[in-house]
Amino acid sequence: MAIRILSGDITKQHVDAIVNAANSSLLGGGGVDGAIHRAGGPAILAECRELRRSRYGKGLPTGQAAATTAGRLDAHWVIHTVGPVYSPDEDRSALLASCYRESLALADRLGADSIAFPAVSAGVYGWPAASAAEIAVGTVRATDTNVADIRFVLFTDDVLAAFQHALG
Ligand code: ADP
C-alpha cells in the first residue's frame, strides 16, 4: 500500500474511487461535495436520490459510506461518506476514523485499486487541520486493505501542510 499527499482539486484525479465529504442528505452541498457534483454531472445526484429512496431514507449516517458511479469524472465510483461536525465538547474522532475505514472497506468490496480522499470534516464541518490529518493518516495506515494506491488530495495550504506533517 502506498499513501501519497497531493495538492489540488480531487475532481481532477484519475483513480478508481473518489471519496466525497458528503452530508447525510446525499443531495449535494458546498465544498468538495459541490465540486464533485458539478464536475461529475447529474448522474451522481440521480444515484444519490436512489440511495435515499432504497437504503437511506433517513440519510446516510455519520461515519458510514455509500457508493455511486462517478458520472463524467475520470473514476469508476464516488464513495460518499459523512464526516462528523467538529465539537470542542465531545470527542467525535471515532466517527471521523470510521469514514476512512468504511470508505476503504467499500472500495475493497468494489474491487478498487486506487482511491483519492479529501480532508473529510476539515472544511465547513470545522475540524482542526492537524487533528483531521492525524486521524486520516493514522486510520488509513492501520486499515487492512487491498487498495494499493491511496491519495489524500488537499485543496488548501494549511490542510496540505497538516497532512504532510502527519505522514512524516
Ligand atoms: P466538510 O463539510 O466535511 O468539512 P468540505 O467540503 O467543507 O467538507 O471540506 C472538506 C475539505 O475539502 C476542506 O479541506 C476543503 O478545503 C476541501 N475541498 C474543497 N473543494 C475541494 C476540491 N475540489 N478538491 C479537494 N478538496 C476540496
Image (cartoon, grey):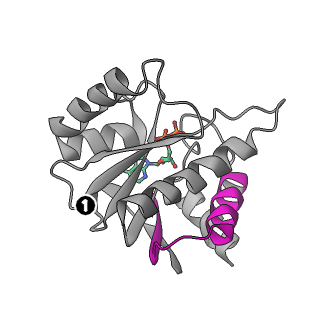
Q: In the rendering, at what x and y percent does residue 22 appear?
A: 44, 37
Which secondary structure lies at badge 1? loop
Please state if 64 lies on the left or on the right of 132 as rendered. left
* Image quadrant in which you'd find residue 80: top left
Residue 9 showing in the rendered view: no
- Relative vertical location of residue 52 with respect to residue 4 in this rendering, above or below: above
Q: Is residue 163 magenta?
A: no
Q: Which residue, given by chain and number where applicable, does mark 1 sit on? A: 75
Residue ID at (36%, 66%): 111
Q: Which residues are magenta?
A: 131-155
- Relative vertical location of residue 3 with respect to residue 85 in this rendering, above or below: below
Residue ID at (38%, 62%): 8
Q: Amino acid at mark 1?
A: Ala
Please state if 11 lies on the left or on the right of 41 as rendered. right
Please state if 143 lies on the left or on the right of 56 as rendered. right
Residue ID at (53%, 60%): 157
Q: Is residue 152 magenta?
A: yes
- Relative vertical location of residue 17 with respect to residue 141 in this rendering, above or below: above
Residue 162 showing in the rendered view: yes
Query: Extreme right residue here?
Result: 89
Q: In the rendering, at what x and y percent does residue 143 appear?
A: 63, 67
Q: In the rendering, at what x and y percent does residue 15 appear?
A: 31, 67
